Image: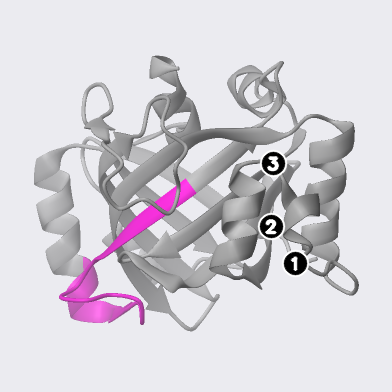
Amino acid sequence: MRFRHEVKHRIIYADLLALRSRLSSVLARDAHAVGGRYEVRSLYFDNVEDKALQEKLDGVNCREKFRIRYYNGDTSLILLEKKSKINGLCSKAQARIDRGEARAIAIGDFAREGFEIAGRELLRELCCKMDLQGLRPRIIVDYTREAFVYAPGNVRVTLDYDIRTGMDCTDFLNPGCVTVPVRDRPIILEVKWDEFLPSVVADLVQTPATRTAAFSKYAACRIYS
């Protein structure tokens, strides 16, 4: 499992405009972008004791969370992901699932669906933790992302905004599920890299009002549920 550095900053709208201009002049746009941006929908999982939420709020050093996700309303590509954080470094395991599997997972009835988990370790792990730890879908998180990449250092810079919550709705595949903006309408700059962060990128992402923030979209959206 490969671990990466990940730093988040909460920024203001003026910074978003400045960063968009500066990053576009040096870095390449992410391949998922349509017209420079793309829409992300995620369904996050937690147990009845809100373990993932509490560990995030408490700053637990070693933690994980599961989610399923698709982009731009296209459910032909749905990804199951597990994000892990250890000693400030992050990693992400990822596996593709189909609509039937996503629907079965979302209602916690994967046994009835009868999909195959043999040889699919991430899917097996989620199913086991749904059985043994009581993981269940908790909330839909929608947002708009602008992403930029830079090959040296395997750098990825993202600008996330219009973060919205499905509140009590977990109907992940329903495009009509109503979502509402989270409080204060946060804008998040996120920078990820491997062994080193090139100075050109470090310089590009500097803004006067930038401050490091332990921001979680999942936690921000859970304020309503």
Q: Residue at x 76, y 52 (%)?
A: 112
Percent coordinates x, y for residue 138 in the rendering? 55, 31
Percent coordinates x, y for residue 36 in the rendering? 19, 73
Q: CA distance from mark 2 to mark 1?
A: 6 Å
Q: Which residue is mark 3?
A: 108
Report helix, strand or loop for mark 1: loop
109 lies left or right of 68? right
- Asked if residue 202 shows in the view, the reply is no
Of the 4 image quadrants, the one containing the N terminus is bottom right
Q: Quadrant of residue 18?
A: bottom left
Q: Pointers 2 and 1 in contact (CB under 8 A)?
A: yes
Q: Residues within 10 Å of mark 3 (few under 14, many from 20)?
A: some
Among numbered discs 3 and 1, the one appearing first in the sequence: 1
Task: Residue type at mark 2: give it.
Answer: Ser
Percent coordinates x, y for residue 159 in the rendering? 29, 54
Image mark for residue 190: none
Q: Which residue is mark 1?
A: 2
Q: Which residue is mark 2?
A: 91
User: From the viewer's perspective, is residue 11 above or below residue 97?
Assistant: above
77 lies left or right of 97? left
Task: Residue type at mark 3: give it.
Answer: Gly
Among numbered discs 2 and 1, the one appearing first in the sequence: 1
Q: Residue at x 55, y 75 (%)?
A: 153
Q: Which residues are magenta?
A: 23-42
Report helix, strand or loop for mark 3: loop
Is residue 37 shown in magenta?
yes
Q: Could you say which is closer to the camera, residue 151 or residue 116?
A: 116
Q: CA distance from mark 3 to mark 2?
A: 25 Å
Q: Residue at x 47, y 37 (%)?
A: 170
Is residue 173 shown in magenta?
no
Q: Pointers 3 and 2 in contact (CB under 8 A)?
A: no
Q: Quadrant of residue 30?
A: bottom left
